[in-house]
Amino acid sequence: MNMAFCAFRKSFKLFKWWVFLRPVSVMLIVVVMVGVLLLVQTKMKDFRHKNGVFVQFDVQEKVRMENLEPMKVQNGSSEAEILSTSVSPYHDWELFAANYEEMMKKLKIFVYPDAFMSNNSSIFSSIFLPHTDPFDPKLGNYFSEHMFKIALLGSSFVTKKPEEAHFYFMPFSINVMRNHPRVHSASAIKDFVAGYTDRVGSEFEFWNASGGADHFYVYCHSIGRDAASKHHELHHNSIQVTCSSSYFQRLYIAHKDIGLPQVWPRQHEEVLNPPDARYKLVFFAGRVQNSLARRDLLEQWKNDSSFDIFSGSSSFPYREGFRRSRYCLHVKGYEVNTARVSDAIQNGCVPVLISNYYDLPLANILDWSKFSVIVNERDIRHLKKILLSVPVRTYLNMYKNLGIVRRHFAWYSSPKTYDSFHMTVYQLWYRRGLHRVTW
C-alpha cells in the first residue's frame, strides 16, 4: 500500500507541475511569435514608405539604388559606357555601330520633286511640303510623321542624282490629307495615293526599275494603313514607315515595313528622376472607350493604392505620373501604338507593353526585354504579381538602359546622332541591296 501511495503522490505532483507549466508554455509560444513579428516589423523599417506604397526591398538594395549615379543614365552616355553596361539594351552594339557608320558615309535617298514645289503652285502643295510648325502641340500623335520629312530634306542623305540613290521617298502626308478639304475622306485618300503613285511611275523611270520596292512613304495617322490598298505594287512592294506597326493588320508586312517611333513634340530633354524617388508602382492615364484591354485594366486595378490608374486625364500633371512611378503602362487603344512608350522612356519610367501584335520600333537593334516589360493582354489580372516579381537588380538595369536608349526616341530641330531620324533611316539602310534593273 505504501508503495502504491508513494506512486500516487509522485503522479499527483507531476500532474500539478503539468497544470502549472501548461500556461507557461503557451506564454513562451506567444513570446516567440511576438518576437518574430517584431523582427518583421524591424525589417519593414528598411523599406522606404510613402503614400502607402513600399518601393524598396532591403537595406542593401536601398544602398544600390541611392548609389546609381544619374550622370550615367543621361543622354550623354559614351560608347565605352554603353559597351561596359552589364546588361546591354542592344543585340550587338559593335555590329550596329559599324553598320551605322557605313550608312552615314554611303546612304543616298532621292526625294520626288513635289516636296520642293512652291506653296502656291498647286492646291495640293501642302500635302507634299514640310510642315511649317512641327512643334505645334496640335500635331500630337502625328509629330513623327512631319519631323521625319523635315529632317530628311535637311540631311546629307538626299541626292539630286537618282541613279545613285538607294531609296526613293514619296513625300505625301496622310495627316495633311486627312485635314485637307478635297482629300479628307478615307476613300479619297486611297484614290489620291493610287493616282500619285501612277503618276510617279509614268513620269519617272525609277519606280519601274524595281516595281516600287526601293520606294517608301511615312505616316502616323491610322488612316494611312489603308492608303495603299488601291495600288497593288505600292502595297505589296513599297516600304511603309509607320507608327501603326501591327503585324495583325493585313496591310502591314513585318519583314518589309518599318515601325516608326511615335513621339510627341518635346522641346527639351527631361532630367531623370532617380529610382529611390519613385514611390508609385504603376502609372496609366488614357481613354478606355476604344479598348477592351484598358477597360479590363481599370476594372482590375483602379482601387489598388500602388497603382495610379485613370480613365481619361490624371488628377495631377501628366508628366508627374511618369516621374514618380517605376512602371508606366502602354495599353493598346484603337491602335497598337501610342506615344506613351516614348513618354515613359524619356522620363525614366520602365514601359510595360500591353499591346498584342505590336511590331516594336527598332526591334532588330534594341533588345526591348532589357528596358521594358512585355505583358500579354490576357494577363492583365496578374499584372501586379508580374511587376513585383521583377528583381530589384533587373529593375535597376532597365532603368539605366532607359538612359541609354532614350536618344533613339527623340526628334530634334537639328538631327543628332542616333536620334529617331537616324535610327529610322538605319532601318531603311538595313533593307538595302535590292537588285535593280538598269534604266
Image (tube, grey):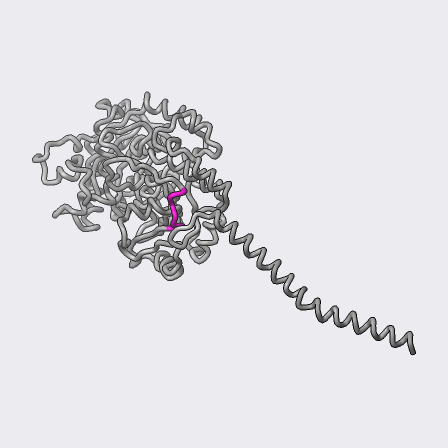
Q: Is residue 105 above or below residue 207?
A: above
Quadrant that contains the C terminus: top left
Question: Is residue 179 part of the magenta span, yes or no?
Answer: no
Q: Is residue 310 above or below residue 119?
A: below
Q: Quadrant of residue 310?
A: bottom left
Residue located at (61% from left, 62% from top): 30
- In depth, the one of 5 and 88 nearer the eye is 5
Q: How many marks?
A: 0
Give the left or right position of residue 44, taking residue 206 as reference.
right
- In depth, the one of 310 and 94 nearer the eye is 310
Q: Quadrant of residue 143?
A: top left
Residue located at (40% from left, 55% from top): 52
Q: Position of residue 334 (x, y in %)?
A: 30, 53
Q: Extreme top residue here?
A: 105
Q: Is residue 428 visible?
A: no
Give the left or right position of residue 5, taking residue 246 as reference.
right
Question: Is residue 281 part of the magenta span, yes or no?
Answer: yes
Q: Position of residue 241 (x, y in %)?
A: 30, 38
Give the left or right position of residue 240, taking residue 21 as reference.
left
Q: Position of residue 377 (x, y in %)?
A: 41, 54
Q: Is residue 305 visible?
A: yes
Quadrant that contains the N terminus: bottom right
- In depth, the one of 227 and 283 nearer the eye is 283
- Residue stretch in magenta: 276-282
Q: Position of residue 90 (x, y in %)?
A: 43, 33
